[in-house]
Image: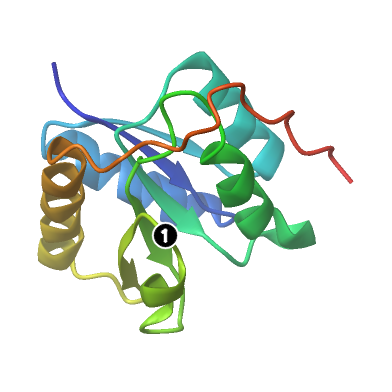
């Protein structure tokens, strides 16, 4: 079964590009352009890798990440940060790298491979298996 990638990206054109690239590479990929949609997607099916735009409106990037890692089975889901701030992954647990525009497709796919390899090693999951409530839409 192909790995599932969730793209959480405000710009629908960028989201569509990433989803298309990942699907062409054989992955199952979906996108959410808003935080609440990303929450619903994770609740419906746990992703294997998340590409997360931290600059979503209303601080949804950090809010989504903070919520996701408390969900059962999601505490160790690797994240690739879509940001202009290189090195930010050092401050975000589960982050395996950062990407910024313009995107290099080879680098993007290499980050997916790295993320899946990290996940396969069995990085410890979050001890909170009760799950936090979804952040409100404000």
Q: Residue at x 18, y 32 (%)?
A: 27
Image quarter for residue 114?
bottom left
Q: Is residue 49 visible?
A: yes
Q: Position of residue 118 (x, y in %)?
A: 17, 48
Vertical placement of 126 versus 94: above or below?
Answer: above
Q: Residue furthest right?
A: 138
Q: Is 94 on the left or on the right of 128, as rendered?
A: left
Q: Is residue 100 above or below residue 37?
A: below
The residue labelled by disc 1 is 93
The N terminus appears in which quarter of the rendering? top left
Q: Residue at x 11, y 39 (%)?
A: 25
Q: Position of residue 34 (x, y in %)?
A: 66, 44
Choose between 51 and 17: the one closer to the eye.
51
Classed neighbour count for the residue bearing mark 1: other residues with Cα under 10 Å, few (<14), some (14–19), many (≥20): some
At mark 1, the secondary structure is loop
In the rendered image of this protein, does residue 44 appear above or below residue 83? above
Which residue sits at x=52%, y=15%?
44
Q: Is residue 6 left or right of residue 124?
A: right
How far across and how far down the image is residue 92, in percent?
A: 45, 65
Residue that extends furthest to the front in the rendered view of this protein: 127
Please state the total of marks drawn on the protein image: 1
Can I make out residue 100 in this image? no
Residue 82 x, y percent position in the rendering: 43, 65
The residue nearer to you, when weighing 23 against 75, is: 75
């Amino acid at each position: 079964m192909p790995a599932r990638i969730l793209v959480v990206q405000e710009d629908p054109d960028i989201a569509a590009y990433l989803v298309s690239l990942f699907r062409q590479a054989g992955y199952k990929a979906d996108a959410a352009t808003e935080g609440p949609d990303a929450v619903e997607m994770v609740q419906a099916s746990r992703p294997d890798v998340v590409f997360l735009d931290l600059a979503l409106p209303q601080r949804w990037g950090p809010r989504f990440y903070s919520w996701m890692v408390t969900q059962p089975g999601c505490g160790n889901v690797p994240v690739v940060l879509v940001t202009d701030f290189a090195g930010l992954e050092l401050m975000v647990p589960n982050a395996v790298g950062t990407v910024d525009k313009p995107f290099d497709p080879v680098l993007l796919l290499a980050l997916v491979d790295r993320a899946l390899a990290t996940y396969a090693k069995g990085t410890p999951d979050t001890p909170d298996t009760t799950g936090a409530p979804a952040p409100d839409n404000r």
